[in-house]
Amino acid sequence: MSALIWSTYLGALCLLGLYGLHRLSLVLRAVRPERRPSASSGESKDALPPFVTVQLPLFNERAVAARVIAAAAALDWPRDRLEIQVLDDSTDDTAALCAAACARWRAAGIDIVHLHRTTRTGWKAGALEAGRQRARGELILVLDADFVPPPDFLRRTVGHFADPEVALVQARWGHLNRERSLLTRLQAMLLDGHFAVEQAGRAAAGACFNFNGTAGLWRASAITAAGGWHHDTLTEDLDLSYRAALAGWRFVYAGDVVAPAELPADARAFKAQQHRWAKGSVECAKKLLPAVLRSPWPWWRKLEAIFHLTHNVPYLLTAVLLVSGGICLGLGGGPPWTGVVHLASAGGTLLVLASFVLVSADRGDRWRALLRVPALVALTAGMAVSQGKAVLEGLAGHRTPFVRTPKDGGGARRYTVPATWTRWLERAMAAYLVTCTMFAALRGAVVETAMLALLAGGATSVAWASATDREPKIKRARQARP
C-alpha cells in the first residue's frame, strides 16, 4: 500500500511537472518582443467601414443589463453601419428592463432590437445562433452582460480584418472590481496571466488560441464556414474556435485593446464559472482532438492543441496529489530522496506562477502580486475538488445545463448560485489535509508541515466560503412563466 501511494503521488507530480514546463514555454513565447503585435495594427482606415452586429446574450441580468446596452450604444461607429441585438433569454423582470432600454435607445437613433426567446434552447450558444440567423453584419461583436468596452473598441480592432484570412480578433479583459476582495484580486491575477501569457504565447507561436466567449470580433462568414454555434459542449467559444481554425481561418490577439468586465464577487459564483469552463474544455477535447490529430497541422501545433484542450486536467491531478501527498507528507517514509522531490515540486510551482505574474502584472504592482502567489497556490488546492469533479464529468459525458455566472453590478446581489453536494467533499478534503498537517508537525517535518499547512488553508477557505455564502437579503425577482 505504501508503494502504491508513493507511486501515485510521484506520478501525479511528474504529470503536473510536464504541464508546468509547457506553461513556462508559453511564458518564453509571450515575452519575445519581435513577435508582439503592433499596438496600431488594428486601426480601421476603410473609406466604407464594414457593417457590424453587436450581440448581447443575456439571461436574468437585472443588475447589469442596462449598463452593457448603454456601452454597446456608445461604440464609436457609423450609425448606419451598426446594429445591436439584445439576445434576451430572461425569465425575470430583466426582459422588461431590456425592452424599455432598447426603446429609449431606438428613440435616440440607435439600430437596436430586443430578441426575447421564451425557451432557452441551446443556452448561450442557442441565443447567439438565433441572433446570427437575423444578423446583417459582416462582423459580429459578442459582449457578455458584465462587459463595458471602451467607445473606440471597434475602431481599434476592425482593421485586422483587412486580411481576408482573419476570422477572429480577441481583446484582453480588464477588471472593474479587481480590488473588491482577495478573491477578486486572485481571479484578476489568473485572468491576467491567461491573456498576457497563454493567449499571447499561443498567438506568438502561430498556434490556435481561443475566443474567450466575449470581447471578441468575428467575421460572420467564418462562423458560417465553421458550422455556426454548437451547444453540445459548455464552452461554445472554445468549440467554435477550433472548428474555425481547422477550417483554415486565422486569429488575431489584440492584447493592447482592453474591455473591462466584472469578476464573480463570491465563492459559489466563481466556482460555478470555473466548473463550467473546466468541464466544457474537456468536452471540447473529446469532440475535437480526433479532428486535430487527423488534420494537416504540423506536429508542434497538434501538441500545443493537446495541452490547450486538456489544460484543466491538472486540477484532477492536483486532487489526486492532495489525497496521496497528504499521507506521504504527513506520515513520511518513502525513498530517501523524497525531500528533494518536495522542495523541487514546491519550487517549480512557485516558479511557474511567479513567471506568469511578472509577465502579466502592471509594473507598479509586481511585488504585491508576487506576495499573493502563495495565496494562488492555496486557491488552486481549494478548487481542486470542484474542478476535478468537472473534469471527470466531462470525461464521462455527464450532461449538465449551462449555469451562467451571476453578477451584481457593484451593488447588492440579486442572484446566487445554489450549493451543491460537492461542498461535502470539499469539507472532507479540508479536514483530511488539516489532519495530515498535524501529523507532519508532530514528527517535526518543517518543510512538509509548511507545504501541507498552505494546502490545508486553501481547502479550508474554499470549503468555508462555499458553506457560508448565504442567499441575498433582498427578495429575488419572481420568475415569470415563459
Image (spheres, rainbow, N blue to C red):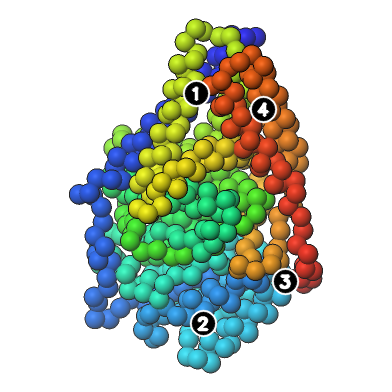
Give whichever of discs 1 and 3 has the lower sequence position.
Answer: 1
Q: Does residue 87 lie above or below 250 as drawn? A: below
Give whichever of discs 1 and 4 has the lower sequence position.
Answer: 1
Quarter holding residue 305: top left
| CA–CA distance in space, label 3 to label 2 | 21 Å
From the viewer's perspective, is the residue at label 3 or at label 2 nearer? Answer: 3
Badge 2, how many Cα within 10 Å: few under 14, some, many 20+?
many
Reading the image, the residue beneath label 4 is 433
Reading the image, the residue beneath label 3 is 92
- Local SS, label 4: helix
Q: Which amino acid, mark 1?
A: Leu
| CA–CA distance in space, label 4 to label 3 | 42 Å
Give whichever of discs 4 and 3 has the lower sequence position.
Answer: 3
Image quarter in which the C terminus is found: bottom right
Q: Residue at x 63, y 22 (%)?
A: 326
From the viewer's perspective, is the residue at label 1 or at label 2 nearer? Answer: 1
Reading the image, the residue beneath label 2 is 112
Badge 4, how many Cα within 10 Å: few under 14, some, many 20+?
many
Picture mark count: 4
| CA–CA distance in space, label 2 to label 4 | 54 Å
